[in-house]
Amino acid sequence: MRPRKRTGGRPGAAVTKPWYVQYRLPDGTQKSPGFETFKAAQDFCDIHGPRIRAGKGLVPLVAADSTVGQYGPHWLAAIRPSIKPRAHEHYASHFARYLEPRLGPRPVCELTRPECRAFLITCREQGLSGQPLRPGSVYAIYATLRTMLNAAIEDGLRHDNPAARLGKPLHLHPTKKARAAAILKRALDRERLHRLLEHTRTREPEWYPLVLLLPRTGLRLGEALALEVEDYNPTARSLDVLRAWNDKHGELEDPKHGPRIVDVSPQLAAVLDAHVAGLRKVVRIDGRPAVSWLFPSEAGTMLDGRNVRRTLVRLSLKSQLGRRLGPHDLRHTFGSQLIAAGKSPVYVQRQMGHASVQTTVDLYGSGLPLEERGSVAALDTEAPAAVPTTTRRRRRR
């Protein structure tokens, strides 16, 4: 039961009041009273809504005067089945660390926009221990507050969200230009990538297949660790990315935006062919391969992500890259180098498993070639034969 605005209308029909409230009585009769203003319609809902809901046997799940500390656990329990465990843990952590200590005693229905803004500014300047927080951390707190207040509207505690659209004026959203600059700083150019790969191949060859795979396929580390031997198709030169390892929860899950098939370059295919052949030599008594993981540990189990990160740091320092390297830096290297080579953003998006092609363009679009003057020639059709032109002299009479 909420105010609605009339839209459209038949030409020539009588002018009606612009706002209305639609509801049904306990006997099933539908009513749609009209109002001149939104406030008048909202006042009607506030006054008669509880009586109508009570007459239909509808009991509210949340008390109208619930505080943030009381409503937060109800909200977290309600959204648990509909979101990923990682997202739920993200919301629960920020609620417990920031929202409940500072906004816990405040009734949800009394929160104001200036109050929400002051809360976010305090988080940015002081954090938990008096140290300023980075904009990304403050944005995570803001997202938790905004999502909770959106749910409060659905539960009938509020009619608006005072935290809506606060991210832009507080500069919590990184600009596309800033994000692209950060990606460019993390990605390796061809010379430095070659130096890293050659050092790994010659000095620590046991790590070479995995280190080569990351910048040649753009897989996330959890997706690479969860690859099995059977996921590699040497005939089609492809990898089936069917699962990902969630290191935080210690379990296998679906890839971030669903399973996908990733193409394998000829150089990587040659390395993987030799790598898989070596794995298949170690068999059990029944003749099956002893390990199922494509990149197993010495004990035959899945590699630990922490060991991979430590190894990449060691390799980056020994190959004199000038900085520490992480697995996601090699993923950004893959995307930026493909885009710089003029490949379609749609192809790059499908290879990397981004949610949309817009994400790919926003992250790596600065590397797209902008000047291809000869490309317009592809629009021309075959030139027709030249038509001779004749000129006639006018006869003088």
Image (cartoon, grey):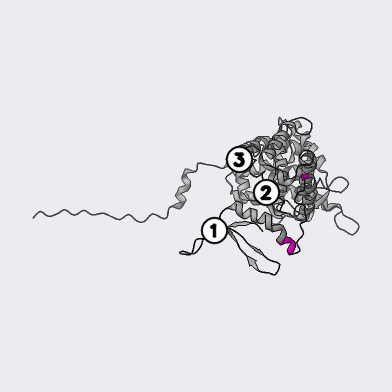
Residue lying at the far left in this picture: please name it.
397
Task: Classify 327 as above or below 38.
Answer: above
Task: Classify 120 as above or below 300.
Answer: above
Span shown in magenta: 52-68
146 displayed left or right of 300: left
Whichever of callouts 3 and 2 sits on the residue coming sooner in the sequence is 3
Mark in the foreground, 1 or 2: 1
Disc 2 element: helix
Q: Nearer the viewer, residue 51 or 19?
A: 51
Mark in the foreground, 3 or 1: 1
Image quadrant for the N terminus? bottom right
Disc 1 element: loop
2 displayed left or right of 128: left
The overriding secondary structure of the stretch rendered in magenta is: loop
Say whether residue 125 is magenta.
Answer: no
In this rendering, does residue 225 appear at all? Answer: no
In this rendering, does residue 174 appear at all? Answer: yes
| Residue placed under numbered mark 3 in the picture | 176
Q: Nearer the viewer, residue 309 or 79?
A: 79
Could you say where residue 119 lies in the image, as x and y percent from the top left?
71, 37
367 displayed left or right of 193: left
Circle number at residue 352: 2
Q: CA distance from mark 1 to mark 2?
A: 53 Å
Residue in the image at 61% along x and 50% along y: 357
Circle number at residue 17: 1
Whichever of callouts 1 and 2 sits on the residue coming sooner in the sequence is 1
Q: Nearer the viewer, residue 249 or 220?
A: 249
Amino acid beneath label 3: Lys
